[in-house]
């Protein structure tokens, strides 16, 4: 009986000696905190939706409010809006555009090697994204659409147009990794990397086109 108690105690000690430091390290590495964005209506009236609570809030020209992750920002054909994220990246919505703020999170602890993340889902329309300079922690900005998954580099300028049929990504400055969301496309053709002054188009169920010359720009 004494040996049983001794061995059991030793086993528990070994488990705790391993699991407590491992659990602490895991938490310090993976714990995150949510951030808000600030949205300003530039023209017309923007609508801010909170799907979790079923609330829609109109935002008039010149008004600014903070919004949490999970919010949906929409503008009609007469309106425009701009969002500023926690890292000072900017997102401009052109008329007839809707974007969902899927994720706005950063590591809770400075010791974490994980990047902060801004995750967006563009439902349709035209938008411009200006990513901030490299900071601490670095920020990974990901834009999802029906057709494409796009990762945008820091200190960049990008124009994206989204319809039911296709997504067009235009890089004015920086780099963008564009990947089709279709599982039917072979892995070797599923991704393209764009540099400054390049663009690509991704149709439903198709691979991204090879890098093309950026022939136009929505910013005027």
Image: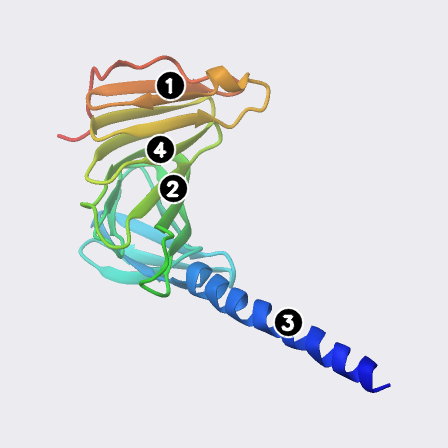
What is the x, y in percent for residue 109? 35, 65
Sequence-first tag of 4 and 2: 2
Which residue in the protein does label 1 denote? 201
61 or 28: which is nearer to us?
28
Q: Residues within 10 Å of mark 3 (few under 14, many from 20)?
A: few
Q: Residue at x 48, y 20 (%)?
A: 190
- Labels 4 & 2 near each other (Cβ < 8 A): yes
Cα gap from disc 1 to disc 3, whole angstroms:
56 Å
According to the image, label 3 marks what residue? Answer: 14
Q: Earlier in the sequence, mark 2 or mark 3?
A: 3
Q: CA distance from mark 4 to mark 3?
A: 57 Å
Q: Is residue 25 visible?
A: yes
Q: Does label 1 or label 2 sit earlier along the sequence?
A: 2
Residue matched to label 4: 125
- Residue ID for mark 2: 98
Q: Is residue 160 above or below residue 114?
A: above
Q: Residue at x 65, y 70 (%)?
A: 15
Q: Mark 4 or mark 3: which comes first in sequence? A: 3
- Most distant residue in the bottom direction: 2
Label 4: which secondary element? strand
Residue 86: x %, y % from top left = 26, 57
Residues at marks 4 and 3 touching, judged by CB atoms closer than 8 Å = no
Residue depth check, mark 1 versus mark 3: number of the one nearer the observer: 3
Q: Earlier in the sequence, mark 1 or mark 3?
A: 3
Which is more toward the observer, 130 or 78?
Answer: 130
Question: Mark 1 to mark 2: distance in Å?
Answer: 19 Å
Q: Is residue 3 left or right of residue 148?
A: right
Sort mark 2 into few (<14), some (14-19) or many (20+) by Cα contacts within 10 Å. many
Q: Residue at x 29, y 37 (%)?
A: 95
């Amino acid at each position: 009986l004494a040996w049983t108690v001794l061995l059991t105690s030793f086993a528990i000690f070994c488990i705790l000696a391993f699991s407590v430091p491992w659990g602490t390290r895991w938490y310090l590495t993976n714990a995150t905190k949510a951030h808000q964005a600030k949205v300003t209506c530039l023209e017309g009236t923007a609508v801010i939706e909170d799907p979790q609570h079923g609330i829609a809030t109109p935002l008039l020209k010149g008004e600014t409010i903070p919004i949490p992750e999970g919010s949906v920002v929409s503008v009609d054909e007469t309106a425009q809006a701009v969002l500023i994220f926690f890292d000072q990246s900017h997102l401009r919505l052109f008329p007839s555009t809707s974007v969902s703020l899927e994720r706005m999170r950063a590591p809770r602890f400075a010791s974490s090697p994980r990047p902060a993340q801004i995750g967006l889902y563009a439902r349709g329309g035209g938008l411009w994204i200006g990513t901030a300079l490299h900071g601490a922690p670095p920020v990974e900005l990901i834009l999802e659409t029906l057709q494409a998954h796009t990762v945008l580099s820091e200190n960049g300028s990008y124009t994206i147009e989204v319809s039911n049929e296709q997504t067009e990504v235009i890089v004015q400055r920086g780099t963008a990794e564009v990947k089709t969301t279709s599982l039917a496309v072979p892995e070797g053709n599923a991704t393209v990397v764009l540099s400054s002054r390049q663009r690509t188009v991704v149709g439903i169920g198709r691979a991204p086109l090879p890098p093309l010359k950026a022939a136009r720009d929505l910013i005027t």
